[in-house]
Structures are given as structure tokens and as C-alpha cells.
Amino acid sequence: MAERSNAPAIGPRLQQLRKERGLTLDELAAASSVSRSMLSQIERGQANPTLAIVWHLSQALGVELSEFVGGRRIERRGRIEVTAASFVPEIRTEDGNCVMRILSPAQEVGKTELYHLTVAPGGELVSDAHARGSTEHLSVLAGELIVTSGDTNAAVGTGAIARYPVDVPHAIRNHGVLPAQALLVVMS
């Protein structure tokens, strides 16, 4: 996947908004219910925040979710809402090897989150445990991904779907030589 020059950088954006509002990490942690250590890791680009975390941060900072993550243009055509491709918000890992395009509407945060995931060869998306009872559904569109949930691993090839608990540490890795793409649904 080609790099996009307008892709949002969550960490720097978070730090900018926090400082503009004169908030310390502790104050933002209290306002958002996101731990101070997680906020620090996000600002340094060392954590991969879920859409739910990004939503809580946008609410605490008083900005629209789309403004926070870089999407700005939503057009209404009657009952149809269209977001231009260049404004679909993205979350990237620090090394840029994993890109998660946020497909979910903001009102679904914390319930059902939908992402288009691209993982470069050698890339990995490693996550801490989510809320108790949370699951992920990974549908591989191209390539092969290795899913780890707790101490269990499974290879998931093109067209296959993996469903697994994510209330334990988990990861999605690409050990192949080509980029892999998938739809990822996170259910809390």
C-alpha cells in the first residue's frame, strides 16, 4: 500500500490537542478514562489505540472523532453519507507496517468496530487484552496472516475467517513476502 502524505499521526495529534487545552497526561487520563501510561505510549507512537480509545480521547478533548484522526470531509446525499477515500481515518503502527482504516461510524465505538487492515511483509499488529468477552473476526482478503490469541496460533489464508477472543494478549502477523489485506471486526 502506498504511503499517503495526509494520513493522520494519532500520537502527535493527541499531544497537540492536549497541550492546546493545557492538560497534563494525568488530567487527560482522568477525563477520558484512558490510563496515563497508555496516553504516553500513544503520544510516543508505541501503542496501537482501538477506535474506542480514540473515541474516548476525542470526547475528553472536545473534538469530533473525524477531526481528531484526520478525516474531515463528509458529504450528505439525501440519506447517504459519503466520506471521500482520502479522508477515511487511519491508524498506523509506529513502523508503518500495519495500517488500519477506520470504517465504523462513530456511534458504534465500543460496540462493533470495523477496520480495513493492511499488513506489510514482516508487519505485526500486537495488542494487549481488550475488555472481558471481546472478540475479533478477521476475514483475509489477500495473502495470509498468522493470528495469535493467548497461547494459540492459526494461519488464516485468503478467503478464510478467524474468530477468536481478544480479552487476552493477541496479535496479527504477516510472515509472507507480499502485503496481506483483511477486514477486522472488533466486538465488545
Image (spheres, helix red, strand yellow):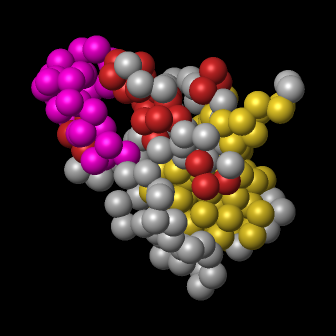
Residue 145 pos. (x, y %): 63, 66
Q: Is residue 36 left or right of residue 46?
A: left
Main SS of the magenta part reads: helix
The quadrant where residue 68 appears: top left
Residue 45 pos. (x, y %): 29, 52
Q: Report the quarter where the N terminus lies.
A: bottom right
The quadrant where residue 186 appears: top right
Q: Is residue 21 left or right of residue 79?
A: left
Q: Residue at x 37, y 26 (%)?
A: 57
The quadrant where residue 172 appears: bottom right
Query: Viewer-proximal residue, 168 or 108?
Result: 108
Q: Residue at x 60, y 26 (%)?
A: 106
Say whether residue 35 is visible: yes
* Name of the residue lying farthest toward the top: 31
Say whether residue 136 is visible: no
Extent of the magenta region: 10-38
Q: Report the quarter where the C terminus lies.
A: top right
62 w.r.t. 179: above or below? above
Q: Is residue 109 left or right of residue 125?
A: right
Q: Residue at x 17, y 32 (%)?
A: 19
Q: Residue at x 68, y 64 (%)?
A: 181
> Is 102 contained in the magenta span?
no
> Is 25 contained in the magenta span?
yes
